[in-house]
Image (cartoon, rainbow, N blue to C red):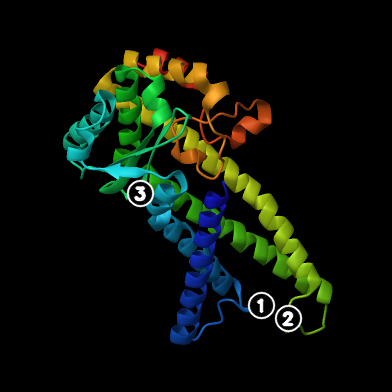
Amino acid sequence: MLKRIFLFLLTNIAVIAAISIIIAIAENIFWINISGYGSGYMSIFIFSLIVWFAWSFISLLMSKWMAKKAYGVEVLSKNEVSDLSQKHQLVFRTVEDLSERFHINTPEVGFYTSSEPNAFATGASKNKSLVAVSTGLLNAMTEDEIEWVIAHEMAHVLNGDMVTMTLLQWVLNTFVIFFARIIANIADTFLAGEEEQTWPSWVYYIVSIVLELIFGVFASLIAMKFSRYREFRADYGSAEYVGKRKMISALKALQKMQNTHLDDDSKFASMKISTKTKKSGFMNLFSSHPDLQDRINALENASI
């Protein structure tokens, strides 16, 4: 856990450093006040774009490296896998077969030690991705079920879900900062009256922070809605390659293990095939994955 927190902080430091450099270059080259108070709507919009562009895409570029370090993923070659179990070989063979069928570069294949039966795909693009599988999944599932799990993760890779999610978060967070700061600027100017201000008052900071939190909640609702949609889409996509029955069987197997094995790690939850936490009502809107029973029902009703 401490290692994952350290990696998360390291990413944030790298992003903040990149943002500072980008803003400094932009201000010196284009002679515009991007980060200053009262610099105008366009400058605030540019500032918001730069901040979240750097934050989103540096995180995306570092995602594969971070996942490897956070989970201790050991990437293996085809020759190394041949010395391991049939299930290890099945994972590698399925990734290779689907990569050839999808006409994409074969992702790196890795394994990590965890009792949690799970798998994930990540990477900056479909041709530079990683598919990782836990030892818990290999031990708990049949070969047919493992094949479906890998097909599901490969569908994420083919759909470019990592990049699409990054773009969505970039747009959403840009508007969160932009509208929060615009409204905070208006509120601060209104309360200042005729008095000329060089620096923002405490009103500006309080209003902008509160509005960023409120708008951030609505942005999260949109992002999680898309995250759940991409899980359904990955289920449907993989059904075309391994069959609906295998998929339903694997989901039912995950459902049985959900409350006892799955690790609820929110920082990486959106990458995985399933999450432990089962929410209900309003809180379900903040879940990155649909309920497993909903996914099973959707597959049973799908004409695949």
10 Å crowding of disc 1: few (<14), some (14-19), many (20+): some
Residue 120: percent from the left, percent from the top? 40, 37
Q: Residue at x 58, y 45 (%)?
A: 220
Look at the numbered discs 1 and 2 and tell me whether their residues touch, using CB distance below 8 Å: yes
10 Å crowding of disc 2: few (<14), some (14-19), many (20+): few
Q: Which residue is mark 1?
A: 37
Foreground of the two, 4 or 191: 4
Foreground of the two, 233 or 38: 233
Q: Which mark is residue 199?
A: 2
Foreground of the two, 189 or 109: 109
Amino acid found under the numbered disc labelled 1: Tyr
Foreground of the two, 190 or 245: 245
The reply to whether residue 137 is visible in this rendering is yes
Amino acid found under the numbered disc labelled 3: Gly
Residue 210: percent from the left, percent from the top? 73, 57
Amino acid found under the numbered disc labelled 2: Trp
